[in-house]
Amino acid sequence: MSSLPIQSVLSEIKSSLSTSPQVILQAPPGAGKSTFLPFKIVLEKWFDGKVIMLEPRRLAAKNIAYYLASLFNEEVGHSIGYRMRGESRVGKNCKLEIVTEGVLTRLLQNDPELTGVDLLIFDEFHERNLQGDIGLALALDVQAGLRDSLKLLIMSATLDNSQLQEKLPDAHFISSQGRSYPIETVYQSDLKNNKHNMVAELVKLTLRAFNEQSGNILVFVAGIKEIKQCQTLLKAHLSEQTIIAPLYGALTLAEQQLAINNCAKNTRKIVIATNIAETSLTIEGISVVIDSGFERSMSYQAQSGIGKLQTQRISEASATQRAGRAGRLSAGHCYRLWSSEVRLSPQSEPEIKRCELTSLMLELLNWGVSSPQALTFITQPPQANIDTANALLATFNAIDAKGRITKHGQAISALGVNPRLGHLLITAQQLPFDGIIELACLLVAQLESNEKAGDDLEALMLKPSYAVKQQQKQLLKKLNVRNSQVAIATDHCGLLLAIAFPDRIALSRDNKESYQLSSGIGASLWYESPLIGQKMLVVADLAFSERSVNSVIYKAASVSLATLKQHLAHYFQEVETLYWSFVGKPKLIAEKRLMLNKLCISKQPLIDVANNKKSAALIEGIKKAGLSVLTWSDENQQLLVRLQTAQQQYQRHHYKIEFADFSAESLLEELDDWLTPFLTGINKPEQLKRVDLKGALLARLSWPVLQQFEQHFPTHAVVPTGSKIKINYRDNESPVLSVRLQELFGQQQTPCIFEGRIKLQLALLSPARRPLQLTQDLTTFWQGAYEDVKKEMRGRYPKHYWPDDPLQAQATKRTKKYM
């Protein structure tokens, strides 16, 4: 192994690990932190006990293990081993185990003291993988209470260390230089809307770089779909001598090695990968990077209980990591599929803030704490996601009414699978079918494999892959079940899925491709799905799509209503539904419904509904439809605005009065209290016009308060002619008094209400009641604008009185002849 930058800080790392409980190591890609550092730790026997390194990606974990084992000239499993869900190569003499996918969490749960383990390494911690955050939180708890001798090494390439250093004030921080040659960055400045044209534009850019440069190329795309599309298009343009190698986790080790290892001399290679190739893995011979600038991630939405699969811009940190791949061996080039004016966010959002947390909460409850706040998490998860996770665990009886883990919850946790699938495996053992356990394990293995072979799970069960069969065996072993070799009846797939996904039982809508889920959301099959036409489905995998109104179903199985009623009767509830619908012509909906969560399975009419129930339903209907369904006369509408104005003014001026809340929200919320007493004999919407709304509203005020209200906020104002003129109250504006100008002669001040606190807005009118002027300052009007008005009015209305001095003139409603 050639000299690597990490060697310059090896002695500092070793010294710090002996004196500090935690060490934070920041080293850019290519420094050797994922390979050379653990190699030296094992080779030089820094510790007597075992070292465990948590690697966030399966592909990296396995390849690092094989690479390090080759340095020792050993088979994997001797000194260097790896362990991941469904696959393990660990011998009794292993000094370094590279683990992933919650394996560290399982080790901690089974042996909180981590007997025989001296060092935990968290590699690529900047990726902020959920399992990394859980593992670190539990390990810190072990350090604090059980084993202060356990050492933690937290490594990252590009990390905002402020959070880490704040949470771990005793940690020793070390920074290592990377080994990177100059990289020339080329921006694709003339590209428009590259998110949707990404593959075609990316292939153009790759071919351009292929012709302009001489080295091997690494292309970063958003997902596996784009990898395959790029691979197909590039093969059509390049000769067979050019190796076009995809790189993602589902490939075999040999296929991965083809992408990672050096190719033959005089042969060029193009590797197409997702962000899996940003860190940890060293892909040999790369001098050119083509970066699409996008990644695909899942963002969980607690309200719906499902995720949204979205293609989004990468962070600045990711862009730096990707570009760095071109400069490990020599000067390189990075072609970016965006312009230099595009601004990227500094860091990606941690997974703990955007993922489903049922597994996290079950792990914590099994650990003995009920909240993430009880442990040192670098980032605390959203409370809404915690609440949704706890609600699902309660549905599974994994926690009791007080939020404590049950025996069933402990059994689910011990299986080390997703809580939904663990609940499925345990509950399946109670079903009276031959071979049901084998089918349950096969189904769980299929779901865990995440293979994209089709959306009909029942069909997939008939031809499972080798990897799925192996995982089935592992699950049977965990359940202490010997494979009975009984032929598996795949028609129970839907029932098993319903155990795990009670919120995703789907009922077909009129459109055969469209379904409503028991959680209330809509979902659709792809247009060629073999499941189209099935009345009921249970959906195991779905996500909101950027291009569809409904969520998209990726994996599901059909199920019959009779099967669900027979074996999962507790899912169903009979409810009486009684409400008034105000959509179109008002009508009473009175039904007995069979409900499966939010799905209405069947309904039948209720007869002989009592009048008091109709009145109660009417109140509920008004609450839902709003106050507008009541019959509001102009007088009553004006009264309501007047009451609301009074309430606002009393509050604004801190007036000592017990005045009721007349906001629309409060009126709806307290509808039962103030409207019900006035609904005697009224049980139909068409009878609402008989309701005394004025009496109902004013009844909310005590007699003394009502008297003050009438005094402070009168309905009319008296002007100098003696006329009582109506005051028009308005929402959030000054009340208006529309009055003929001549009736105000002799009045100097603007009329007021509320003990002089509120000036009325005067709408001054001509003798024909046409608008002349708006003012809230009558004195200023007389002194200024009146002169122009007078001149115009004398010409238009010569028979009317237009004095030169309006303050000394007599107010009048009549012409000069009758004054």
Image (tube, grey):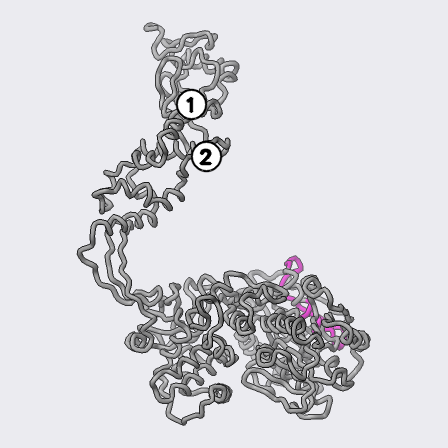
Quarter residue 819 falls in: top left
Tag 2 residue: 648
Q: Residue drawn 38% across and 29% down?
A: 704
Give the image location of residue 812, x and y in percent. Answer: 37, 11
The N terminus, quarter of image: bottom right
Question: Is 148 located above or below residue 636 in the figure?
Answer: below
Q: Residue drawn 33% across and 34% down?
A: 698
Q: How many residues crowd mark 2 within 10 Å: few (<14), some (14–19), many (20+)?
A: some
Bounds of the magenta segment: 320-343
Residue 512, visible in the rendered structure = no
In front here: 52 or 472?
52
Give the number of the disc on residue 763.
1
Q: Closer to the observer: label 1 or label 2? A: 2
Residue type, label 2: Gln
Give the number of the disc on residue 238.
none
In front here: 456 or 55?
55
Tell whether position 92 is magenta.
Answer: no
Give the image location of residue 666, x and y in percent. Answer: 40, 43
Q: Earlier in the sequence, mark 1 or mark 2?
A: 2
Give the image location of residue 280, x and y in percent. Answer: 67, 77
In front here: 396 or 818?
396
Which residue occupies the extreme left position in the image? 608
Question: Is 605 located above or below residue 50 in the figure?
Answer: above
Residue type, label 1: Ala
Residue 220, visible in the rendered structure = yes
